[in-house]
Image (spheres, rainbow, N blue to C red):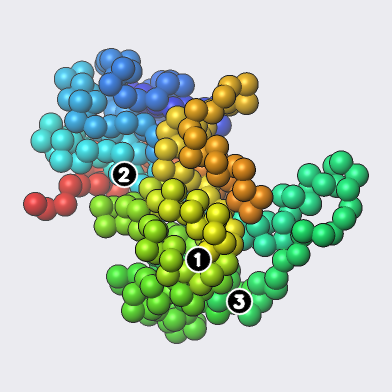
Amino acid sequence: MRIDVFSAKEYDRAFFEAENRGAGHELRFLALRLGPDTVSLAEGADAVCVFVNDRVDQTVIDGLASRGVRLIALRCAGFNNVDLSAAAEMGVAVCRVPAYSPQAVAEHTVAMILTLNRKIHRAWARVREGNFELEGLLGFNLHGKTVGIVGTGQIGATLAGLLLGFGCRVLAFDPAPNAELEARGVVFCRNLDELLGASDVVSLQCPLTPETHHFIDECAVAAMKPGAMLINTSRGAVIDTRAVIKGLKDGQVGGLGIDVYEEEDDLFFEDLSNRIIPDDVFARLLTFPNVLVTGHQAFFTKEALTEIARTTIANVTAFERDGAPLHAVTAPAG
């Protein structure tokens, strides 16, 4: 099958070509994002491979289907950028990579917690300028602190294990409590406010759904333990950024670490170092000394990229052979 890989970087090419050697698909790499203005580039493709910031709405799906595309292969776990109902209506299959490396995201989450707490980013900048002053770099022992995890899927469960290893008290909130985590000492809270009010650090590991959109809003910020740290390595729109900025300004939020951002489509995965960033909300975030931003890199390890490419190629191969991918995504009933 011919697979058009949109939003492709050099590392995507390297890992996908390595995994495709035994499969024999025709790979066509396109640096442009998939959207209404670029859907015509998929002319002649059997499948398109898309990433988190590609736009796959009804207009795009209609354009893909009219050009003979039969499969949309997401090389990520999230699928909130795809109109699943439109895909089903047009007879276009959708698949994803449900789990590539929960360790990668969980370890990056811990790295953000430690960096913010011990002010590693600020200390690095100081030392490069010959400033070895310790004033302003005071942190706290992570051991013994209470960390709340919102969402205990594979990433959240892996993160819980890492934090238990640090000697933390781990709370969790999830519609489906994990009995194995409970047996290891993780305490599941009855509601979100209970977790927020008791946690020194709150980490978001939940998917973006209509129910979790702006899950952390002004009310949730007010319910947090004063001065608590907030980490988001899930999806940007889980946080109402303006509400969190207000919390940062009044000290209710003691630190913020984000690897994702609600309006990241026009920012992340691109070199904008020679341009003015027009997003005033994002620019405001960068003015806070207790805010740490990384550009959606939590997944970015050799192991994760290998698994992403392997699973994506396997999805396409299964679709070609059996008419159905291994990890299909379908619209919910109704």
Q: Mark 2 points at which residue?
A: 79
The CA span between labels 2 and 1 is: 24 Å
Q: Do the residues labelled 2 and 1 touch (CB within 8 Å)?
A: no
> Could you say where residue 9 lies in the image, as x and y percent from the top left?
52, 27
Residue occupying image coordinates x 42% and y 70% = 223
In screen coordinates, is 149 left or right of 41? right
**Quadrant of residue 172 in the image?**
bottom left
- From this view, report whether residue 82 is shown above or below residue 37: below
Give amino acid for label 3. Lys
What's under tag 2, amino acid-wise?
Phe
Task: Name the image quarter holding residue 169.
Answer: bottom right
The disc placed on residue 311 is none
Task: Where is residue 292? Give x, y as percent.
Answer: 61, 49
Q: Nearer the viewer, residue 294 or 101?
A: 294
Image-based side of 198 in relation to 87, left or right:
right
Query: Which is nearer the eye, 275 or 168?
Result: 275
Identity, as a three-letter code, of the amino acid under mark 1: Val
Q: Mark 3 points at which residue?
A: 145
User: Mark 1 = which residue?
Assistant: 202
The kind of secondary structure element at disc 3 is loop
